[in-house]
Amino acid sequence: MIPSTLGLLSLFLYTQIQQACANSGQIFVTTSLVNFDARIVEVWSGGGGERWMITNDSNHPFSGREFGAADRSTLKGTQTFGSGYPYGDVDNTTIAGRPFPYGLWPLYWGNNTMGSDEYGPVLDGVRPGGQLVTIPLKAQGQEYNIPEDEIYYIIGDRDSALFLMISLFKVCDVAPAWPSKFEPTSPNSTLRIENVIQYYRASSFALASPLYNNSYARTNRNTESMENSPIPDVIRLSKFHQCIDDKIVDALAIMNWPPNPAWDRAITYIIAFSLSGLPILGVLYCLGLWWRNTVRGYRQTRQNEKEQRVATLAAREETIGYEHYP
């Protein structure tokens, strides 16, 4: 009787955990139609793990490229399009042919800027996270005491932008706003490549402001270039901007560790053993196997998050110091 009760309880808890996970901000990146290989991009994820390869069994547009494995400590790039790649930037003159360290494709600016045409709107149907969008970020209260024209925009795939807006609304007092299609080649576009303040996630996400104009952005031919127009004080010293940047670094969706089959196997064994009346010792043995296979991944994720926080603070202090003492 007790084993059967334990099995039913295990089954109930497992279904509740699965429902809770289903409500978190997740993007499923499918790379094969033969075996439905997929990885999960998730908000607040620590990232990491091993690189995967997009197989050539389903005519994927980027077959043979590596993806995943990057962690949150390397999320920030610079003001230069094509920056922020923790691996794969073998040619600094183009982003064409590069891997996807965080699982998402880089932005598209039109006119084959830095070789970005291969990620253009013709492939929006298979772009992870959906088509590129932009969302305005305005302070809705008086907490920051900023001028009315201090407005920022996030640019990225639809799902990543929507997930991030939830955090920005809760933490940075950003006014609720819905995404609109990002059309960088339209003459009516609010944003230009010159307006980008910061690229993130291997240039697959960006923060921009009409108050900033980077005169080097359109003529730059080196993704590693640090030659950019200075960011004006109204942005650089803004607490509102700092909150937005901090929250992007903390919460922007990136690819999880590869799936761990040991967890699903352990749950299956627990339920099977309990329902069949086998000794509780077998259940404990399965839990031990699962713990052994997952504890290293958990520890590594926590270590990555700690290193990322230290690196972010150090980078901010160094940047402010440089700009104060050119």
Image: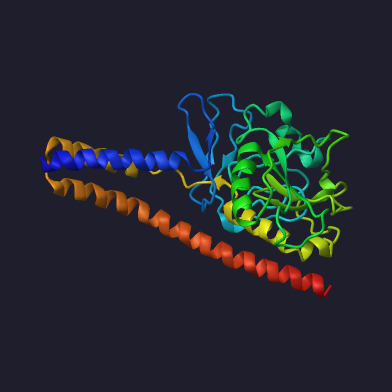
Residue 161 location, quadrant: top right
Image location (x, y in percent) of residue 295: 36, 56
Q: Kindly identify the residue that appears in the image at 63 percent across and 68 percent down.
A: 313
- 262 on left or right of 228: left
Q: Nearer the viewer, residue 150 or 3?
A: 150
24 w.r.t. 241: above or below: above
Picture residue at 52% right of the left edge, 64% below the top: 306
Question: Nearest the camera: 152 or 318?
Answer: 152
- Please, which residue is most extreme toward the bottom here? 325
Q: Is residue 274 left or right of residue 36?
A: left
Q: Position of residue 41 (x, y in %)?
A: 54, 42
Numbered disc total: 0
Which picture quadrant has residue 10?
top left
Residue drawn 12% across and 41% down? Answer: 278
Question: Closest to the observer: 176 or 236?
Answer: 176
In which quadrant will I find the N terminus? top left
- Above or below 314: residue 226: above
Q: What percent of the width, then of the height, locates residue 178?
A: 68, 39
Screen quadrant of the C terminus? bottom right
